[in-house]
Amino acid sequence: MWRVCFSLVLLLCGVFQWSSVSGALALTINLHSGDTIHINRTETALVKCDVCVGNVCQSAVALRQDTEVNFTCQQPEDIFTVEIIKHIECSAKCNGSITPEQYPSLQSFSRTFTWNVKAPQKAFSVDFTKAGLRQIKPTESCQDKHVYTVFTGTTTVGRFCRLGTIKGIQVPLEGSVSLKVPGKEQLDPTTFGISVKNEIKLLAIINVALPEADSSQEFFSPNYPNSFPDDDEVTWSFLVPPKYYTTMRIQNYTETKCRKQDVRLEYQLNGKRMVKMLSDAQLSEYPGPFNLTLQNCKMEPTSSLTLHFKTSAVKRGNEVRCTVDLKKEEGLEMRIKKKKTNSTCILKQSSLIQDTITISSAKVAHLTLIECKEDDLQLNIYQNIVCQKQTNCTSSEFSLKVPVLERCLPGVLEQVTWHLYSPQHGAVELMSPLGSLQQSLPGQTCNSSLLFTVTEKDQPGITMGHYCPQGAIQKIQIRSNITVTAFPAAGQDLRQMTYPLLKGSFTETIPESYIFTVLPKKDTSVLLATPAWPAGMRPYATVSWIVSFSPPFEAQLEFTNISQVSCQSHPTSIKVQKQGSRGEAYSWRIDEKPKAVVLEESFYLNMSNCHQPKGTFSVVSQITLLKRKNMLLSIVLSVVSVVLVLMVVALAVVCVINRKKKKQKAPEVSVYNTNGHAFLPGLHGFPQTAEDEDFHIYHSIDDTLVYSHLLKGGIEMKRFQPTVDTYQAFTGPVERQPLKEHEEDKGTDVGVYRPFSGPHIPPELPDRSPKQGGRPAIKDEQMAVKESEDQTHGTLALQRAPIIEPEVDDSEIKH
């Protein structure tokens, strides 16, 4: 309202008056000191209208003093624009403030206030320290309709609105500042300063002061959207409040063809320089002040350079400084990475913000971490263990363990990877310091807090196997360079595991591609899969499992999962061989279905793939160790039991028969008598002493085989000694004719069938005197038995039985 009143007062005072001259409008303008007013007809005007000073009418006029002007049309504000220019000369000093001055008579016109500043051999600064400026695009307008433009020479530094972060703009030698206010818009004057600065060698320096609040703003290269001047520079100087971190991102730019040098962005960071290309990732999460310089090259005539970028600042806290020293580590590399790029965590190395930091062995890194929590960072460690030649290795044995990390370093150690390089003709051997490993398979998952993954270097992307501690695998041997990666279980941190995770060594080459040493546990099934299961073994690969167990046990081997594969030549095979034996116990080709087998001894399980398999060769085997049953002892006990039963039955039958015969008739005695009497009737037994035990009594006697060998032995020894209690086979002819009466006096036994085909004249028999009741042959018979046993050692022994004396026919006794 006060502005309207002020305008009315001026109108009444005669400063502003309209008059009608020949149907046109007249305007009286009073100039402020040092101002020059230019009234210009727009090139797009559709109505012909002139501005007249006195009797001279033309399309444009320049006023340097108070003047009355006339227009040949009724609404000249739609056709003419007004520019109010002031020249400022800064020779030595030019410190002061500038405030746009009101021209109420020109308020209906579109006005541009321009201040041309010269600073010979110097530079000057336009300071908007109170209000500040915000850079906008050429087609963009300001909310208050007041648009400022800064020029240096013929180059537009930029277009700006009030209330921004740009506090000042320095230009060399000479330049200008303009304020454009549209027609019929009341001027809202803002004071800005002009000061002399030291000489600069670049196009301009734009000073930006970020507020103490989260903020973001856009910036454009000079002359945008037209090309930045050839081989020139411009600098943005950013002042950042404490605990605020700035990130710069390029929104768009134009490619430039250069004849010399390259277009680049150079950051000055606390005395250090960092050069980036326009296509590179730019500064991220940097604390403190910094400068950004755009440097153009010598361009091709048809090239142009434009740049549009955006900066943002965020307040941070909880800064931690940490030094990581890897000077004593060999072949080690540590990577620290932000899990999320939009995280509030700031990761810096030597004052440079990075999303990933890599620290190599024999180096020291100085890190700064701001607002970084445990779950914001991911730590990974990589180590190379190399043995070029077996004889040159400092030690063929090594331990895979987690290096000790600084406590100041936050984050979870998610994995440790070891790259093991064996000699050209060597192998790598892995063992667990806890004694054994288990293969992680479906149905045999690991419940450990640690998991290992083994990968072959020549098969990237294919895992040879997953393992964990506490199983049946005692040793793994691989004829290849391998990578071993240790992962913790969920919620675990590898840095807490300070003990060796695995033991390894470089050994001489092995005959197979892979060898596993397995010690199964009692009453526990062990699953063993071929390497690279289920992807399949590589062509021509071979694998062996050395399965060992103690004799009281037996192993049941089954094949629970076998993939189908076809081969052009050299088919795949599965073989089982007993340890210490070269022969194969079992063998199958892959087109056959292997059956479950039981092995009573330690064995080898061998498998081989063909050269060009169609399909994947992968097998899962199951080994179950069980207590072996003593089959031999069972058989022996069964046989003994049957024999005892038969003996008891036979003994009972014999006793019954003997008792019946004794009741019917007393048995007679028939013995060999050297006195020529074949029978001694009436003798039912002989008195027995300790020497006269029943050593010569049998269940049954084969008459054809009893005495013939004794006669033969007597002839050879020139004497006759009857042999008792032994069995010898006789192969000569056998006479089945009965004895005749006239042959009884020739010394032949009566009542005993004894076929003989030898000489008709028996050898001379020694004299035998009867002893102890008429049984003279007992002693000699026992001697013959003993001598026969010595001569026929190993013959079949006959079973002893109760005395069953042969019955003698009465008719033979009478004869």
Image (tube, helix red, strand yellow):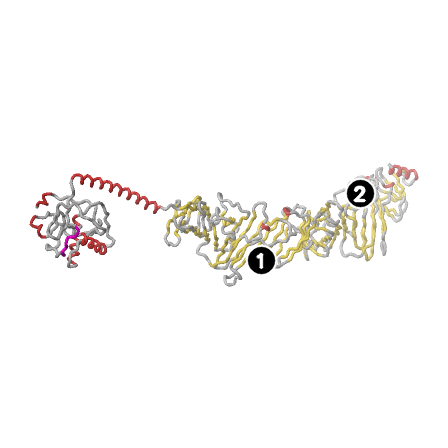
**In the rendering, at what x and y percent does residue 442 appear?**
49, 43
> Residue 21: in sight, yes or no?
no
Helix, strand or loop status at disc 2: loop
Residue 463 is left or right of residue 92, and the answer is left
Residue 501 is left or right of residue 740, and the answer is right
Helix, strand or loop status at disc 1: loop
Residue marked by disc 2: 146
Residue marked by disc 1: 331
Disc ID at residue 264:
none
**In the rendering, at what x and y percent does residue 172 appear?**
79, 55
Q: Nearer the viewer, residue 688 or 521?
A: 688
Earlier in the chain: of badge 2 and badge 1, it is 2
Q: Nearer the viewer, residue 21 or 67?
A: 67
Classify residue 331 by image quadrant.
bottom right
**Residue sitting farthest toward the right:** 13
Amino acid at pointer 1: Gly
Classify 10 Å Cα crowding around label 1: few (below 14), some (14-19), many (20 and above): some
Residue 414 is left or right of residue 776, and the answer is right
Q: Nearer the viewer, residue 325 or 16?
A: 325
Amino acid at pointer 2: His
Q: Are marks 2 and 1 in contact (CB under 8 Å)?
A: no
**In the rendering, at what x and y percent does residue 7 appear?**
88, 38
770 falls in the magenta region: yes
The residue depicted at 39 percent of the width and 52 percent of the height is: 578
Q: Quadrant of the N terminus?
A: top right
The residue depicted at 59 percent of the width and 56 percent of the height is: 332
**In the rendering, at what x and y percent does residue 140 appear?**
75, 43
Extent of the magenta region: 766-772
> Residue 335: in sight, yes or no?
yes
Name the magenta segment's main secondary structure. loop
The residue depicted at 48 percent of the width and 54 percent of the height is: 478
